[in-house]
Amino acid sequence: MKIAIFGSCVSRDTAEFMPDAEVVTYVARHSVTSLETPHGTDNVDLSDLTSAFQKRMVTSDLNGTGITRIVKNAKDLDVVLIDLVDERRGFWKFPDGSTMTNSIEVESCGAAREASRRGARLIEFGTDEHFSYWRQGFTKLIKELKGSGLWEKTILLDIEWAGAVDGAPHRTNVGVTKLGRKLRRFQRGSREMTRELSRGSGLGEAWHKLHNIRPTEAEQFADRAARANLDYIRYRKTASEKIKFCIRRSADSVRIDREHKWGPQPFHYRKRDYQSISREIENLYRIILGRPEGEFHGS
């Protein structure tokens, strides 16, 4: 099965669990806004990026060539995977109306700082302004896929961010979760306060410890996932209405893999999650091929 990806590690990592899959084209670090209003590479210094892959992805975004790279391989492709995770960091809008995805690479090499110095504004994900530009860019993406005959082979991976690490319960009762969190923070704060007093600290400093307890890693993951999943709702809804095939997973059905090769993140899942998603891709591929389930043997 030959695959093209317009998305993130969610799609790329899933493809690794498909033994017959070959990723022909991987378009990452792209907001779909770059398809309509790419900034270009003039006055953008990427010399601090040491990875050839990173340079290639950012350059593609700046030139707006993401979908072109997929379409040129249209005749060879069996499936196109799309996910929306790389939209999460927003994009820079320059005074001339051009845009640049605010990828981690763009920040790390100083291009984001230079964009701000040159008068660009960061359009943050989840805002009405971001959604408006994203919807226009996504419409162009779909138009190009239809024009090249790839729309019928396109699958949206609508996978919510996981709010819990593998092995931990995923609490669905928000009220109980908040109450439990307050209790646990109070308990941690009480322990910190006791330790400070035993060390000879003043009551004021110990009291400060009680009321300034930082959230645990698990709480940070849960908070990030909850905010992201809420912000993504209208994006996912719009995308799923425009794409023929969709694979969905809710936040309470996936978990964060603490041993993930890229490190624990709400969008870095367990092996069993990727395996489940990959099996569903293969089932949809059978439908794309028009073959009964028993006739599929890979490609």
Image (cartoon, helix red, strand yellow):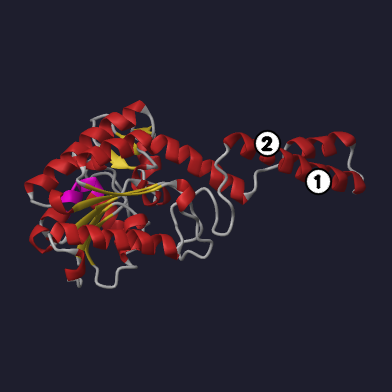
Q: Secondary structure at mark 2?
A: helix
Q: Amino acid at mark 1?
A: Glu
Q: Is residue 63 magenta?
A: yes
- The quadrant in which residue 124 appears is top left
Residue 279 in the image: x percent, y percent? 31, 63
The residue shown at (21%, 33%) is: 136
Q: Position of residue 275 (x, y in %)?
A: 37, 64
Q: CA distance from mark 1 to mark 2?
A: 20 Å
> Mark 1 falls on what kind of element?
helix
| Residue identifier under label 1 | 192
Q: Position of residue 152 (x, y in %)?
A: 13, 50
Q: Main secondary structure of the magenta part?
A: helix
Q: The disc labelled 2 sits on which kind of residue?
A: Leu
Q: Quadrant of the N terminus?
A: bottom left
Q: Closest to the observer: 219 or 293?
A: 293
Q: Which residue is mark 2?
A: 179
Q: Quadrant of the C terminus?
A: bottom left
Count all numbered tags in the image, as a single digit: 2
